[in-house]
Image (cartoon, rainbow, N blue to C red):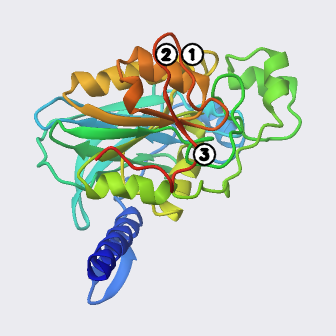
Amino acid sequence: MRVLARALLWRRSMNRALLLLFLLGACADEGVEDRCEAPAPEGRWQRPLRSELIVALGEPTHAVRDAFVPRGQRVRLEGKFAYGPASTDLEGEEVAAFVAVGGCEFLDLGVAATDSDGRARFDLRVELPVRSAPYAVEMIVLADGSRASGGLYVVPPGPVVVFDIDGTLTTSDLEMVDGIVIHHVGATSEALFELSGSALSRAQWRGVLDVVFDEDATVREGAVDLAWAYADAGVQPVYITGRPYLYDAMTRRWLSDRAFPPGPLFMAQSMAESIPNVGAYKRELLLELQSDGHEIRAAYGNASTDVCAYEEAGIDASRTFIIGPNAGSACRGDATQPLSSFPSHEPLL
């Protein structure tokens, strides 16, 4: 038994090491590792007056939405491009997209212009082979070279396990109003509020400024091991959170730094999906996963919105595990499975 335990521990350690290498985009050249990046084509602002004002608001809050598709299905990749603490949209500007297909080789998806919502979309016209690791996706704003990264998962239909993040994988739930997390940006001016185009009222805007997501949030004991137990058994982890897209890079770093197994990350793509419809947003994602032929082996959450979203997506209460104050609660049907801790929990393998 000790030999078996050591073998399993070694395998998990190797899996985590390989994961970290992949997420860093490392390429080995004569024993020296160097991060591979897609080439950055040069460009210029198409709408210089407005775009330069937007860029001056602050750091990019770009995000690439992960794609999780069966082989042979049409693949549309989407990026969101915005700047500053209010995530002000970059409109009418050129973005290039690339998919890393092996080593430091990139598939060029061409150039697309951002729409009025700051989104650029690309169709993948080449069928990529199925593989266990995601294909890295990079999108680049041509005028300033700012980037966003995401993943493309080409997978056969199969079992998946769903994890909420805040209050489920973390020890505390810092979400507010059904799942939104707003980064602290200090006092806001009327001009910033107007330029942001926020769907929130002024009262809501000011009310959420002090809700801060801590990038160093403590991971719940046993959460990483639980996710790896599923991954090692061939059950693909899927991370679904009510956080808005502007926390994409922060969330990816949090998962990577704590060595969670790779899996698609789905975040709310608009304020409307976070306030007040985070439950509906999660339900629709889960239904989409199932329509693609994936069996949701288990779902983990902590909030009442998780309980209802999982039930409304048709996930049986016997496979729905809730931790925290809502453990064992129900939406309209049967009570969910209460969890007191992850170490004491036996996953559904």
Name the spot of residue 161 as percent of width and height, x first: 35, 40
Q: Write down the residue under mark 2.
A: 280
Q: Write down the residue under mark 3.
A: 60
Front-lying residue, 212 or 145? 212
Question: Marks 1 and 2: CB-CB under 8 Å?
Answer: yes
Please name the amino acid that badge 3 sits on.
Pro
Please name the amino acid that badge 2 sits on.
Ala
Circle 3 SS class: loop
Which residue occupies 31% across, 54% down?
A: 231
* Placement of the N terminus among the 4 image quadrants: bottom left
Q: Is 319 positioned to the left or the right of 196 in the image?
A: left
Circle 2 SS class: helix
Front-lying residue, 332 or 344? 344
Please name the amino acid that badge 1 sits on.
Asn
Front-lying residue, 145 or 36? 36
Q: Write down the residue under mark 1.
A: 277
Residue 119 location, quadrant: top left
Which residue occupies 63% across, 15% down?
A: 276
Between marks 1 and 3 in the image, the one whose residue lies nearer the viewer: 1
Crowd band around label 2 with a 10 angstrom C-alpha radius: few (<14), some (14–19), many (20+): some
Rounded to the nearest angstrom, the CA distance separating label 1 from label 2 is 5 Å
Name the spot of residue 330 as percent of width and height, x first: 54, 19
Mark nearer the N terminus (2 vs 3): 3
Question: Marks 1 and 3: CB-CB under 8 Å?
Answer: no
Rounded to the nearest angstrom, the CA distance separating label 1 from label 3 is 26 Å
